[in-house]
Amino acid sequence: MLNDTVLKASDLNKSFSGIVAAKDINVSINQGEIVGIIGANGAGKTVFVNMITGYLKPTSGKIEFLGEDITGIEPRNATHIGLCRSFQISQVFMTMSVKQNLMIAMSLSKKSGKALLDPIADEEISKECDKILELYKIMDQSNNIVSTLSQGIRKLLDIAMAVVGNPKVILLDEPTSGVSVEEKFGIMDIVIAALKQTETSVLFVEHDMEIVERYVDRVIAFYQGEIICDAPPKVALSDKKVIEYVLGH
Amino acid sequence: MFTGIFKDTSVRILITFMIVLCVLSSLVLPDWMQNNFMYGLSRGLAILGLMLLWRTNLVSFGHALYYGFGAYAVALCQKYFGITDILLRFAIAVIAAGLLGFCLGFILRKYREIFFAMLSLAFSMVLYGLLAKAEFLGSTDGMSISPSTLLGMELTRQYLFYLITFFVICAAISIQAYLRSTLGHLTTAIQDNEIRVEYLGYSVQKAIHIKYVMSACLAGGAGGLMAASLGQVDPDSMVNWNVSGELVFITIMSGWGNILAPFIGAIIFEFIRTYAFEWAPQAWAAIVGGTLLAIIFFFPGGIWSVIEKVFNYGKKKNVK
């Protein structure tokens, strides 16, 4: 199963008023694979993630998901077909509790039935949400209002909300940004363990090389909108170009 | 499946409040007060619609468009089809305003903040201009509305008041059911974070459009009931910008914490205006404005936040 391609980007290009943000990007992701995307600020990592999830339309090129052309898909349709994302800055509903956030996400993923009428009172949804809260180890925060919680918990909630519909691929944009040094490995351990259980393919943008080295199967390095290296972490992190343009040594 | 809504505390409070209002107005209170309640409840429907939009951070400065459209729909149906039945009048007002809201919603759902507010005001002023110029609609003098009937029998003011209360209860319960649904929760979620809603798989524009149509229906219904209780429609008292302003004024004054808040706010507004006009005919507007300023300064959550504080204080005292 691990060699089945779930996501493929071919010759992707993106420019903003003549400024090239992505140039000839060719990437394929297999099922269950964990891929780290690295690069300096402005290298084109987030542009790539945004194009894949429909937030930006590529200037040219093709994106295929499970063999189907999804180039320029609307973000909500990307979610429907099983291509979800979390954000650099956690995109959660600040005025609601942790569980309410998750219940809304869950009820939307159901698309029909009683759950849509009264999601907060729906026992089935509540049980399913409890399972996810347990999986992401935020059960004890269940009734707390999100605005009162730490960045780490918000990150976990953000990712938990993205996976309620059991996506095939999840794109995590800097999952440990804004998280304290003490929290970062704990958070990544929880997230990766949860996603491995469901064989979800993971693409995550990360600046922290300790995280990259520890969790990914493959590294894709970006520089000025181009891919300069696509290899296993040990090879990639010792590559000359990566050392010069990404790690800055 | 829908019985759960009647276990909702807000719904129970609403029904109790309306029953008490009906009993008081029929047994104790003078007729003029009943009129104030009737106008307050009718207008409260439009406020409820604005409250819905406010929950998504959208403020419409032109909701008199639907308020007036509903009222004129009632007047036109009487003029051309002889419809005086209150059930039909209410349904026509709601449907007419809902259809207009559905069409305009395609444009308005793309805008936020001041652009949404001013665009809605622009649409309402277009209708005002048309009504003020159209002689077959009575121009600035408007049109008169004959007393309402129910199944062929003429309604007394008392029964009209009961029916308006009934319509208000039905509408408010429907809105509470909507607020409890996933789509309803999205109303607050959109206010918090539009991008996340899109990535959860729901179209923000669609959610806003649905809510806008609901809000238009409520304002239309309010206009229809107001026309039926006043017996007169004219552009200045139904569609002009100051009517929209008044609706926004009452919405801020009421607060958005509960489905009952708009009705309490609208009733209090009717009384403030009545007394202010009686005591200081030259300065009544200053009194009304001063009241709003005082509410904004001291109770930014509106009248409902005061009610909540009083009840919470009572609860704490009981616990001690």
Image (tube, rainbow, N blue to C red):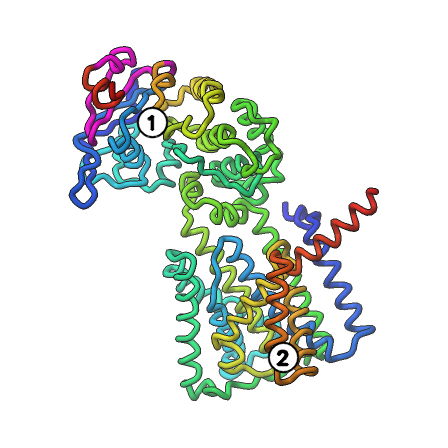
Q: Chain of mark 2?
A: B
Horizontal arrangement in the rendering, residue B294 relative to residue A65 (left or right): right
Query: In this image, B34 relative to B86: left or right?
Result: right
Look at mark 2 in the image and give the residue it sits on. Answer: B284
Residue B170 visible in the displayed image: no
Q: Amino acid at mark 2?
A: Trp
Residue B29 x, y percent position in the rendering: 79, 75
Badge 1: chain ID: A
Which percent across, then down, holds residue A161? 48, 33
- Residue A84 numbered mark, or none: none
The residue labelled by disc 1 is A205
Above or below, B6 against B156 in this view is above
Q: Residues within 10 Å of mark 2 (few under 14, many from 20)?
A: some
The residue sitting at 79% across, 73% down in the picture is B26
Q: Is residue B313 left or right of residue A71?
A: right
Q: In the picture provided, is B258 more to the left or to the right than A232?
A: right
What amino acid does circle 1 point to? Val
Q: Position of residue B146 (x, y in %)?
A: 60, 84
Write the start and end of the magenta stretch as one range. A214-239
* Residue extending furthest toward the front: A249
Q: Is residue B5 magenta?
A: no
Q: Position of residue A124 (x, y in %)?
A: 59, 32
- The local secondary structure at tag 1 comes to strand
